[in-house]
Image (cartoon, grey):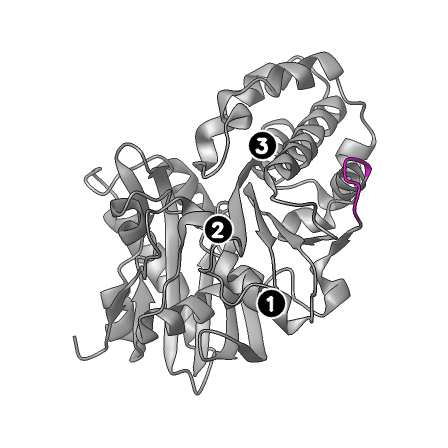
Amino acid sequence: MRALGLMSGTSLDGVDAAVVETDGETIAAFGPSAFRPYPPEDRAALRAALGSWPEAPGLEPVEALVRDTHAAAIAGFAGIEVVGFHGQTLAHDPHGRGTHQIGRGDLLARGSGRPVVWDFRTADVASGGEGAPLVPFFHFACARRIGAAAPLAFLNLGGVGNVTWVDPRRAAPEAPGALVAFDTGPGNALIDDFLMQRLGRSFDDGGAVAAAGRVDRRVLDGLADHPYLQGSPPKSLDRQDFHGFLDRVAPLSTEDGAATLAALTAACVAAAARHFPEPAERWLICGGGRRNRTLMAMLAAGSNAPVAAVETVGLDGDMLEAQAFGFLAVRVLRGLPTTAPGTTGVRLPVCGGRVSRPEG
């Protein structure tokens, strides 16, 4: 099928849209892609809504702006048979209130005239899983596509960091031992929010601010004591779970604060490797963090395996997550699992997601 995946992540920068041709098990081809940014006022509205649950008042305009932006993204593509729509995560508490991705897939299907698969996380959480991360099954297909013959790690550095350890020698992604996946800790969110406070910038372009600073080891050691970082997977995070760390770097200069927060992200990734069943032969990095040269250097220094952007193996680090939701949409249509014990801690493999068709 020719599927269009849509992803609006915790960086709150906009909507990634990408086409993948797939049967939900293998990747036949990658198609065109596009990015539709949120204008500053929409980004501010989304940021203000973070932490909100469905019953919170005043969310209707936020839902509408998410849906309208995604609808505009869909309109730029032809020949699409199904759309995978992640929505925008506002709150995530899998062992408490659940998970909340705002965006009505049924209305999006009606407005776009295409079948939409959405609400990917709820079924997993209801079955005892973390509801995240969701991309590992696609990572397994990518590992097969690039011809990997030994375990490797895919690291996504969006607002939150998440890693997938893949053993491509296994028969399927849901097979025991095929995947281990979890959120590593902060990705770019703390750096982005810190620089917005200090400089009014939404991110550290190329890691230049961090490169001009020095890591404060005392502050870094204090940050690394967070209980989440001491726990074993399966585990997942809300974007705001580490937001209090900004108070800890407040006494530092802008440059030293950015460097220390980048070092925290890298330290969390290095610590994650101890949970792999066997060492990864290499690390492939996707998401906006791979453009932060200072952070990439820190990752390489903390790993005993090669670290490189996914572009080095012919993948698109900007669109990998969007492609994943097109891939997962096809799996849902076929009734194939989208999560498994090794990825979210769910008791048994689960096929998550609702299907909405234009005709209702």
Report, in whole angstroms, how far the alpha carbon at label 1 lies from the one at label 3. 29 Å
Q: Amino acid at mark 1?
A: Cys
**For the point 76% across and 32% down, which residue is it?**
210
**For the point 33% across and 49% down, which residue is it?**
101
Q: Which picture quadrant has residue 98?
A: top left
Q: Residue 121: where, in percent of width, then height?
A: 33, 52
Badges 1 and 2: C-beta atoms under 8 Å apart? Answer: no
Q: Would you name the residue on which mark 3 appears?
A: 190
The answer to whether 60 appears left or right of 305 in the picture is: left
Helix or strand or loop: what does disc 3 sit on?
Answer: helix
Quadrant in which the N terminus is drawn: bottom left
Q: Would you name the residue on which mark 1 appears?
A: 142
Specify the segment rendered in magenta.
Answer: 301-305
Let me know if residue 187 is in the magenta part. Answer: no
Q: Amino acid at mark 3?
A: Leu
Badges 3 and 2: C-beta atoms under 8 Å apart? Answer: no
Q: Residues within 10 Å of mark 3 (few under 14, many from 20)?
A: many
* Visible residue check, residue 150: yes
